Amino acid sequence: MVANATILYYSVTRRNKMKGSKNTNNDRDWTDTETEAWMGLVKAQQLLSRNVEDELKKKGYPPLNWYDVLWELDRAEDGSLRLNDLGKRVLFDKYNVTRIVQRLEEEGLVSRTQCPVDGRGIFACITDKGRMLRREMWPVYKETVKKSFFSKFNKKELKELKNFIERIQASGLEETI
């Protein structure tokens, strides 16, 4: 998705500059403002995630997607989730969940168990070692987000941003992702 959005943005921007046109994106009928808002959102998410990832790496911690899985499991009611449900909650592409859980299991950070009810589903369960690692990573994650995101907005702007995000989420869009 990010790659396609980036290609669209640069091709539209380049074409518009070459033609001196305000909006030549007839394929989508997006205005320049719509294109810039969409691309700004996608690129900001990319940059912020990369920034957190880089800071974790500098401090010798595993990747951000490991933190994401450990965080979701740690906040789950009993510390476990079906892989399918975990895939709906994490911030990265669902198809990576099984592979990441396998790596976390190899490191002793999670365990996998078969669903006792239907025998087909697999649960990922956070271990004590996984909880400890996630809690060690938290200060780096927290401070990086504060510095690179929260510090760019005042309280009113953050509230407005939160409201915009809630409007998107309330539209039911997250149900299809």
Image (cartoon, rainbow, N blue to C red):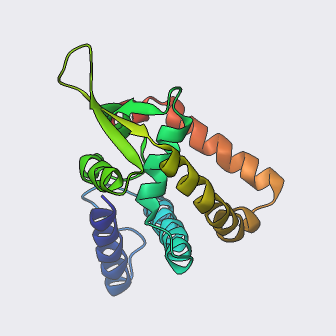
As drawn, the residue found furthest toward the left would be 120
Task: Locate the C terminus and report the quarter of the image it occupies.
Answer: top left
How far across and how far down the image is residue 4, in percent? 27, 64
Position of residue 119 relative to residue 171, above or below, is above
Residue depicted at x 39% and y 82%: 20
Count of numbered marks = 0
Figure quadrant of residue 39: bottom left
Left or right of residue 48, residue 102 in this image: left
Left or right of residue 95, residue 17 in this image: right
Residue depicted at x 61% and y 54%: 135
Left or right of residue 154, residue 14 in this image: left
Residue toward you, 53 or 147: 53
Residue depicted at x 43% and y 72%: 22
Position of residue 38 relative to residue 22, above or below, is above
Residue 31 visible? The answer is: no
Residue 18 visible? The answer is: yes
As drawn, the residue found furthest toward the right would be 155
Residue toward you, 103 or 149: 103
Position of residue 149 relative to residue 96, above or below, is below
Task: Locate the N terminus and report the quarter of the image it occupies.
Answer: bottom left
As drawn, the residue found furthest toward the bottom would be 18
How far across and how far down the image is residue 52, in percent? 54, 68
Residue toward you, 158 or 59: 59
Residue toward you, 157 or 118: 118
Position of residue 11 relative to residue 88, above or below, is below
How far across and how far down the image is residue 126, in percent? 45, 41
Residue depicted at x 53% and y 26%: 77
